[in-house]
Image (spheres, coloured by chain):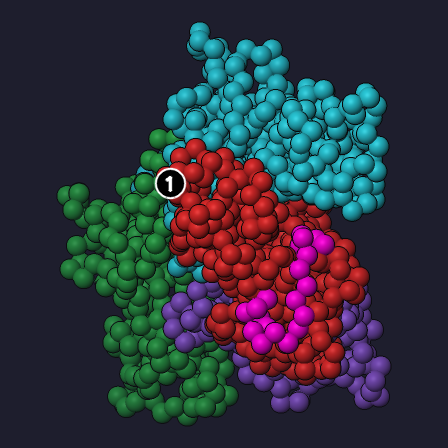
Chain colours: A purple, B green, C cyan, D red
Amino acid sequence: MSEQQTTARVLRQGFLGPDGTFCAAALRAWDPEGRAEHVPFATVPQALKALRAGEIDATMAPIENSVEGGVPATLDALSQGTQLHIVGEVLVPVTFVLAARPRPDGSRMPLADVGAVGTHAHAWAQVRTWAEANLGGAAYVPTLSTAAAAEALARTGELPYQAAVCAPNAAATFGLDVLAEGIGDNGGAVTRFVLVALPGRLPAPTGADKTTVVLFQKLDRAGGLLELLEQFAVRGVNMVRLESRPTGEAMGSYCFSIDFEGHLAEERVRESLIGLKRVCADVRFLGSYPRADGQRGLVDPGMRDGDFVAAREWIDALGG
Amino acid sequence: MSEQQTTARVLRQGFLGPDGTFCAAALRAWDPEGRAEHVPFATVPQALKALRAGEIDATMAPIENSVEGGVPATLDALSQGTQLHIVGEVLVPVTFVLAARPRPDGSRMPLADVGAVGTHAHAWAQVRTWAEANLGGAAYVPTLSTAAAAEALARTGELPYQAAVCAPNAAATFGLDVLAEGIGDNGGAVTRFVLVALPGRLPAPTGADKTTVVLFQKLDRAGGLLELLEQFAVRGVNMVRLESRPTGEAMGSYCFSIDFEGHLAEERVRESLIGLKRVCADVRFLGSYPRADGQRGLVDPGMRDGDFVAAREWIDALGG
Amino acid sequence: MSEQQTTARVLRQGFLGPDGTFCAAALRAWDPEGRAEHVPFATVPQALKALRAGEIDATMAPIENSVEGGVPATLDALSQGTQLHIVGEVLVPVTFVLAARPRPDGSRMPLADVGAVGTHAHAWAQVRTWAEANLGGAAYVPTLSTAAAAEALARTGELPYQAAVCAPNAAATFGLDVLAEGIGDNGGAVTRFVLVALPGRLPAPTGADKTTVVLFQKLDRAGGLLELLEQFAVRGVNMVRLESRPTGEAMGSYCFSIDFEGHLAEERVRESLIGLKRVCADVRFLGSYPRADGQRGLVDPGMRDGDFVAAREWIDALGG
Amino acid sequence: MSEQQTTARVLRQGFLGPDGTFCAAALRAWDPEGRAEHVPFATVPQALKALRAGEIDATMAPIENSVEGGVPATLDALSQGTQLHIVGEVLVPVTFVLAARPRPDGSRMPLADVGAVGTHAHAWAQVRTWAEANLGGAAYVPTLSTAAAAEALARTGELPYQAAVCAPNAAATFGLDVLAEGIGDNGGAVTRFVLVALPGRLPAPTGADKTTVVLFQKLDRAGGLLELLEQFAVRGVNMVRLESRPTGEAMGSYCFSIDFEGHLAEERVRESLIGLKRVCADVRFLGSYPRADGQRGLVDPGMRDGDFVAAREWIDALGG
C-alpha cells in the first residue's frame, strides 16, 4: 500500500470490530506484517465517519457477499457525503462455526442444549439450512457482528443465546468451543472487502484493475439504464457488478453502484466516464484499484489505449 | 382480492409479526374489513415456508424500502424454492417513534436516560441522524423487528435497551410512551409490501399493472445485462425496479429481480418474456398484479396490443 | 422451380434482353434445360410491368452488382406498385470483352481504330481503367444494355461507336470479333439476379435461405434506422444487404431495402418481421428463397426455432 | 466561398456539362456573380480527375436525387483515390421539359411526331409515367446528360431521337421549342450537389452544418452496422443520409457513405469519429460544411460542446 511507503508515522486503519470479525481477517490479509495500526469500530458507518474526520487513514469495509449480496450500509456511506476512494480490495472466504462457552465441567455443550443462537443477520441467513436441520427450533437473536456475538458469550453466560455463529478465528480469539464447523449453507461463500481512503493519488494501474462508480440518472431521460450501459458497451468496457440503490428521494428513484474492468488511466475507462458524466445527473467516481484476483480482462480490438490515441491523432490531422 | 370472493372459508394471511409491525399495517391496508385471518410469523422466510407448506393462503412481505432498498430475505425467498406469485402490492409510509415504558411513577422517560435503543437494523439505519443528534452516544441493540423491540419492552424492564424505535401503532399496541415522533431521517420514506400466494389464476389486468420476474444470465453470453434490457426496449416495456442479487454460486454471478409496467395478458409483456426466456439461462415469473398507485403507464405507438395483433395477422396472411 | 412441376403449360419468363445480356445468362443458369420460354424486354420496368399484367409468369432482374452496387430500377420497381415476390436468386460472374464487326477484309479491327465505345453505363463504369489505358481518348456512347450495343453493331456499321463492351456470349451470339477480353477493372465482379413472380406459395425452406423486405420508417420516431436494426439483433437475425432508397416524397425521406438470412417459416424471421411491422410505417415483404451460394447461416443459441417454441410453451403454461 | 476571398487569381470550378445541365445550375446558384470560371466536363469522374490533378480548384457534382437516390459515380469517386473534401452543398429543384427543334416552317413539333426521346437515364426514369401517357410507345435513347441530348438536337436533325428531356434552361440555351413542361412524375424532385475540393482549411462551423464520411467495416466484427450506428447514438448525433456501396472486393462487402448533422469542430462529431475510427477497418472523412437549407439540428442535453468540456474537466480533476 503506497501510503505506507510515503510516510514514517504508523498508519491507522479502521475495521468492523471486534477482533475476530471477517473484516479483521480482511485487514490482516491486506497488511499481513501488521505495519499499520488496526482500529476496531462497532459499525461500518462509524468507521467511515472517523475516516472522513481524519481520525484514521483508511477503513476496511465489506461491500458484497457472494451469497447475501451488496452491503447497503457500505454502499450508501460511499455514495453519499464527503468523497472517498476505494484503493484496494480483499476477498475473504466465509466459513462459519457454531461456538459456545465450555461448560463449567470443561465439557463441550451438546447441540441439543442450544435453545437460541446469536449472530449477525447476514451470517444467520447463510447458515439457515444447517440450523433448521441440526438445531431444531432454536431461536435467533440478532447481534451487531458475528464476533460481537462470540465476544459477549466469552464475557458472560447471562445472554439470551447459548451459542454464536462466527468465524473460526473468532471462536479461537475468545476461547470458545467449536460445536460444529463448516456450517455455511454455501461452501464457497466469499465476502469482498474494500479498503477506503480519502481521495489522493490513485493506485498505479497494474493491467488488472477495477473501477467503481455511482451513477445517478436524469429523471427526464427515456432510455434509462440501457442508455447508461451503452456508454460502456461502445467502448468495450466490461461491467462486473451492478447494484441499484434507492436515492432516498422517492420510491422508484434509484442510483447504480457499478464496478467495471479497467483503470481511470486507461482510455476506454476515461472516455466511458466522460460519456456517463454527460448523460447522468451525476457520476461519483469511487476509485480505480488492483483486482484482488489479479485477473487481466481481455480488451477487445479497437478498445485498447493505442486505438484511442491513433484515432485522436487521425482526427487532429484532419483539422477542424 | 379474488380469493376472498371465490371461497367461503376464511383465508389465512401471514405477515412479519408481531402486531404493530409495518407489515401488519400493510396487511390491514390490503384487507381493511378483516375478512381474512392475519397470522404473525417471526421472520419473512418462516412465513413463506408456511405458505409453501399450504398452512396459510398468502403472505404479506416487505420487498423494498425507498431509503434502505431491496429486502434480500424476501427477494431471495421468492427467487428460490417452489414457485410463488405476487398477487398485489401495498405502499406503507414509514414513520418512526422512539417509545419507552412509562416510568414507575407514571412519568415519561427523559431522552437523557436512554442509554441503548432496540430496533430492527433497517429501522436503525433510517433514524441514525436523529439518534446521533438527540441520543448522544446511545448504543444500538438489534432486534428481529421494530414491533418485537416494542413488545419486549412492554413485557419486561430487564432488557439491554431502554427505548425502541418502532411504528406509532406499535407504541400504542403495547402501551408504551412516545418519547419522540417523526424521527426518521427521511420524512417521505415508504416501504413497499407484496402479497404472495401459490401460483393460481393471475389477478385480472386493470390497465395499471406491474409484472415481476427474476432473470438468470447465461454465463457464456457477451452482451450481459445490456442484452436483457434490449428485450424490453424493443417492445416498449418500461422497467421500474432492478435489483441484482447473487446467485450464491460464485462471486460475480448475479441474477436480476425486475419489476416492469404491464400485465402478462398484454402482448408487449408476453413477447418480452418470450425473448428473455430464449436468451437467459432461466426466467422466473413472479406474477402480474395491479399497481398500488393505480398509475397507468404510457404505452408507445407500435407497442399496444392491437399493434401486435395486426402485425401477426399481416404475417399470417403472407403464408410462409 | 416449383411452378414448373405444378403446371403442364410452358412457363414464360421475362428478362432484360436481347439475348446475350448477363440477364439472359442468369435465366439460362436458372433454367438450364430451357423448359420455360424466355421472353426478352428492353428494360427491367417493362418486364416487371408485363409480369404484373399477367403476360408472363416470372421475371429475371438484376438487383445488385458487386462493383456497381444496387440496381435502382429493380429496387424501386419491387418496392412500389403491386406486390411481387422474389422466388430465387442467381449469381453471374461478370466478364467483359471489347467486340467489333469484322472489317470488310475479314481482319480484326485494331484498338487504335476504336474512336468511340457503346455499352450500358454500368458496364462502362466497370471497364473505365482498362479503357483509359488502352483506348486513349475513346468517347463513350450509352446504350440500353451491353447486348443491345453488340446487336446494333452486328446490324449496321453506321453507328456513333465502332466497338461494344459486352459479355463474351453476346459477341459470339452476334458474330462479332473479340478485340480484347477480361477487360473488367475488377476481375471477380459478380451480378446478382433475382427471379420475381406474383405472390403465391413461398419456396420451401432449405436451411440456407434469404428473406428480402423493404422498410418504411415512421417519421416521428427518434431512433431511426438503429431502432429497426435492433429488431433483427434481439432475434439473432443477420443482415446481408442494406440499401437505402429515396421514397420520392422529399429529400431525406428514405426506405430501406434489406436482405437477411433465414426464411419466413423460421421463428426468428417471423418475430423480427412482427416487430418491424409494429415500429415501421410500413413493411413490404418481398419473399423468402434459397440462397444461390447454399451457405447455411449460423443461428445463435436462443435464436433457433426450438427456443421460440419452448419459450412460448412456457408462457402459455403461466396462464395470464 | 472562402477560396475566393483568399486569392487574387480567378478560381476554376468544374461541372458536368455542357451548359444547361442541372449541375451547371447548381454552380450558378453557388457562385451567382460568376466570380469563378466554370469548366464543363463530360462526366463526373473526369471532373474529379481534373480536380485531383490540380487543373481546377473545385468540382460541383450531383450526389443524390430525391427520387433516383444516390449517384454511384460521385459516391465512389469520393470514397476511393486521393482524398477530397466536400466544402458546400446546393439543392436544385429538378424540373423537366420535353424539347425539340423548331420545324423547318418554324412551327412546333406535335407530340405525335416524337418517335424516340433522348436523355440521361436518371431523367428518363423520372418522366416515365408522363411519357407512357403522352408519348405512346416512344423509344428511349440514352445520352450522357440531359443537356447533351438538347445540345445534339440543336446541332443536327440527324439523330435517332426527335425530342430531348432536359432542364427548361437547356431548352432555352440551345434554342429548342418546349413541347411540354413540368413533365416530371414527381413535382417536388430535388437534386443535391456538392462542391468538392482538395483538402484544406474546413469551412468554418455555422451552427447548421453537415459532415460526410465513408465507413469501412471490419469483417470480423459481429455487430456490423448496428455497432457503427451506436457510436453516433451515444453521442446524440443524427444521421441524415446512409448509402451502402459495394467495396468491389466481393459480393456482400459494403462500405457506408453517411451524412450526419454537425461539424468536425463540434465535440459530439469529433468523439463519434474517434469511436468509429476505433471500430471500423477505415473511416474516410469527406468534409464538414454548411447545410444548404440552413436548418439547425436540435442538440440533446448532454451532447453539447459544453457538456463534453465539463465532463473532461471533471475527469482531469480526478487524477488518474
Q: Nearer the viewer, residue C126 or B67?
A: C126
**Residue D315 in which image quadrant:** bottom right
Does the stretch in magenta take in D37? yes
Dot 1: few (<14), some (14–19), or many (≥20) neighbours within 10 Å? some
Does the stretch in magenta take in A267? no
| Percent of width and height locating residue A146 | 59, 66
| Percent of width and height locating residue C13 | 50, 20
Residue furthest front as drawn: D105
Q: Nearer the viewer, residue C1 or A120?
A: C1
- Residue C131 makes an appearance in the image: yes
- Residue A28 makes an appearance in the image: no
Residue furthest top as drawn: C8
| Percent of width and height locating residue D132 | 40, 38
**Residue B210 in which image quadrant:** bottom left
**Residue D230 in which image quadrant:** bottom right
**Disc 1: which residue:** D134
Q: What residue span does the magenta drawing correspond to?
A: D27-46
Marked residue chain, label 1: D
Q: How many marks?
A: 1
Q: Is residue D291 left or right of residue D195?
A: left
Q: Amino acid at mark 1?
A: Asn
Q: Nearer the viewer, residue A314 or B236?
A: A314
Residue at 24% in and 60% down: B30
Residue at 17% in and 43% down: B6
